[in-house]
Image (cartoon, rainbow, N blue to C red):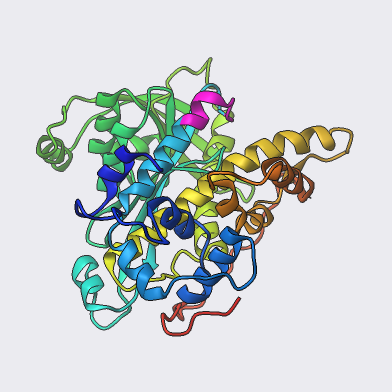
Amino acid sequence: MASSDFLERHRVGENAFTRDRKLPLPQLVRFLLNLRKGANQDELDRFFEVVCEQPLADSVSKSALTQARAKLRPEAFSELSEVLVNEAMRTLPMRRWHGFRLLAVDGSTFLLPKEPAIVEAFGQTGEVTPQARFSRLYDVLNRLVVAADIEPLSLGERILAGEYLPATRVDDLLLYDRGYPAFWLFASHAVEQRHFCVRVPRAFCTEVQAFAAGDAHSAVIELTPCDEARRQCQAFGLPTEALRLRLIRVRLKGGEEEFLITSLLDEEAFPTPLFKHLYHLRWGIEEGYKTEKSRVEVENFSGRTVHALKQDVLAKILTLNLTAILVWVAQWMTTRLYQERRRGYQVNFANALSKMKDNVVRLLSAEPPPDLLERLLCAMALEVEAIRPDRSFPRHIKSTTPKRFHPNYKRCR
């Protein structure tokens, strides 16, 4: 973060961050990572109180922040996040499913400030609040965002999913919900030699319809592309040969049936009963979006430009990933602390996020306070909740009134 190479890659203009200011690049990055939700000036004052370790320390103006952040490319946070995730996977025994890293793909829509530049970049339908399509490649077992996109609504979720494949590895298993099935996407996985498991609608194709009409729990099929699927494959430069895949029938508690299609053909290595729980694990990405929207208020933007918007989102994702890795270590401590209890216990992630406010600034300083990391991990490990498996709750219909974070009315601390 303080290296000259990082500076060269991510500054806007060769004169950026060359003068001695109170917000040099490392300082600016630390500020943007501090899970900001309030007014910029209030957040700046609080930041410098933490940095200087004294109340009412000399701060900078919000205008200085605006000028400084305009010189930093948002992609800086994507690079730091990628380095963090790759290093965690390399050095820590992260959770896996039968040897696979489980990656779920899903999208969501986020409300944006109604500013001309933002509307021009992301589009707008009529007079409604402008929205963007957010897409994530998410490690559901370890709460890590592996890749993130912020794009116009006009760009489809399947296209974004296909673009994630080069960032995956041969030991990844990708999970998709029923909005993603497409022959060309399956063919992309075959070309990249990536395994997948996707929920498919009953009417997805004749092969699925025939399987649904029977009573088999599992069947290996030859999936042949229709004319439209062939045209799509040709447009993307993909092969159009039939794919050998496996269909799975999953029966739910209420008697409903779901159908999954997967590239995991080996019945012996991957018995059919495994897939019900496997697909359920995909729900972790929904919880990830809930954390982004509700816990860290990712729609609560601190600027009115596309540049600032992307900085805010990617900075909060980086802090979420850093928190997830600390929670992974804290969970190791929790498991040993509560191993004699009747139930298992897990670290309360929302509480862990609260502890990251200001402490992320201290952790990333050139000289972190002694024992801060150890004390932070211990505090996280002691804030736990019991694990109660197989619980379910009725789904409540959300209000149609859009939730807004008005840029002129930021909350006080």
Q: Residue furthest top?
A: 268
Q: Which residues are magenta?
A: 87-95
Q: Quadrant of residue 113?
A: bottom left
Q: Position of residue 255 (x, y in %)?
A: 60, 48
Q: Quadrant of the N terminus?
A: top left
Location of residue 113 with respect to 198 vertically, above or below: below
Tell me what residue is drawn at x 42 percent, y 62 percent.
22
In the displayed structure, 62 sits above or below 189; it is below
Question: Is residue 390 found left or right of 129 in the rendered image?
Answer: right
Residue 88 highlighted magenta (yes or no): yes
Q: Quadrant of the C terminus?
A: bottom right
Along the line of sight, the residue nearer the viewer: 212 or 287: 287
- Residue 198 visible at all: no
* Residue 232 location (% of width, % of height): 15, 41
* Residue shown at 54% from the left, 32% from the top: 275
At a point 32% along the width and 74% down the height, the residue shown is 304
Inspect this view and state whether residue 252 appears: yes
* Count of numbered circles on the image: 0
Q: Does the magenta run of residues contain 35?
A: no
Relative to residue 359, is residue 221 drawn left or right?
A: left
Q: Is residue 381 above or below residue 221?
A: below
- Residue 319 % position (x, y): 51, 51
Closer to the camera in the image, 212 or 195: 195
Look at the picture and state if 403 lies above or below 5.
Answer: below
Closer to us: 225 or 69 = 69
Left or right: 403 in relation to 4: right
Q: Residue at x 28, y 48 (%)?
A: 10
The image position of residue 308, as x and y in percent, is 33, 65
